Amino acid sequence: MNYLIEYLTKKDQTREEILKLAREIVRDCAMLIRRIHKSKEDVFKEDFKSIREKIIKLKELTQYPEFIHYLSTPEQEFVEAYTLYNIKFYNTVPKFEDFEIIKEENYILGIADTIGELRREFLEAIKEDDKEEAERYYKFMEELYDFIMSFDHYYVVDNLRRKQDIARGILERSYGDLVYFIENLKLRKALNKE
């Protein structure tokens, strides 16, 4: 009986530690995404290194199979932040192989979430009248959307269909915004000539 009490006590303590660390990773990623949106230069390498180390620690803590699901959100948030970062500063989408510590499903879902973050950059470009930048972000949104739509494994990847539907809506709204923006630019240019 003492063994069982000790076992369950240790398991419960591990679960509490996992929850605390998972929340910390998600919060760190959310704050990092906000800073990436506001920044004009790459100053984030140390942030990613720190979050990566926390994810490794989180993985080590998930020794009980029933705790594996606690990795999902932190890993997806990390993929989302790192993908936004790479697109914004290096004009590239990181491949799954670049994330040796991330589960396959969480990579796909994190990529799906990045589309919403790219919309923020896209709208910022429109606000600044930067047609090339708006088109660049829109093309990345299309690329990520095409990637996630190549998967139809809905019974294997939780939330995949919902995230695909959300991404489709974001892409359709963004396309409308882009067309309107380009037409508006043409009209303003024509009015300025007169």
Image (spheres, rainbow, N blue to C red):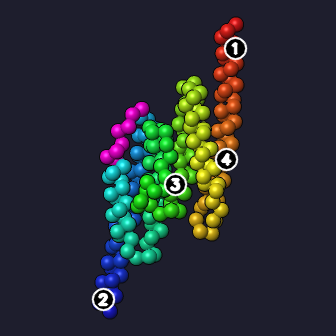
Say which amino acid is labelled 4: Gly
Disc 3 target residue: 110
State how far apart marks 3 and 4 are (Cα).
17 Å
Element class at badge 4: helix
Q: Which one is closest to the eye, mark 4 or mark 1?
A: 1
- Which disc, if any, is residue 119? none
Q: Residues within 10 Å of mark 2 (few under 14, many from 20)?
A: few
> Is there a contact, CB below 8 Å, between mark 4 and mark 2?
no
Q: Which one is closest to the eye, mark 2 or mark 1?
A: 1
- Which disc, if any, is residue 3? 2
Element class at badge 1: helix
Picture residue at 35% right of the left edge, 81% below the top? 8
- First to last magenta residue range: 40-47
Disc 1 target residue: 190
- Which quadrant of the rendered structure holds the C terminus? top right
Q: Earlier in the sequence, mark 4 or mark 2?
A: 2
Give the answer, above or below, for where 86 lies relative to 153. above
Disc 4 target residue: 169
> Is there a contact, CB below 8 Å, between mark 3 and mark 4?
no
Picture residue at 54% right of the left edge, 39% below the top? 120
Say which amino acid is labelled 2: Tyr
- Relative image position of residue 113 (x, y in whole percent): 54, 51
Evaluate whether residue 18 shows in this view.
Answer: no
- Which quadrant of the rendered structure holds the N terminus? bottom left
Q: Earlier in the sequence, mark 4 or mark 1?
A: 4
Q: Earlier in the sequence, mark 1 or mark 3?
A: 3
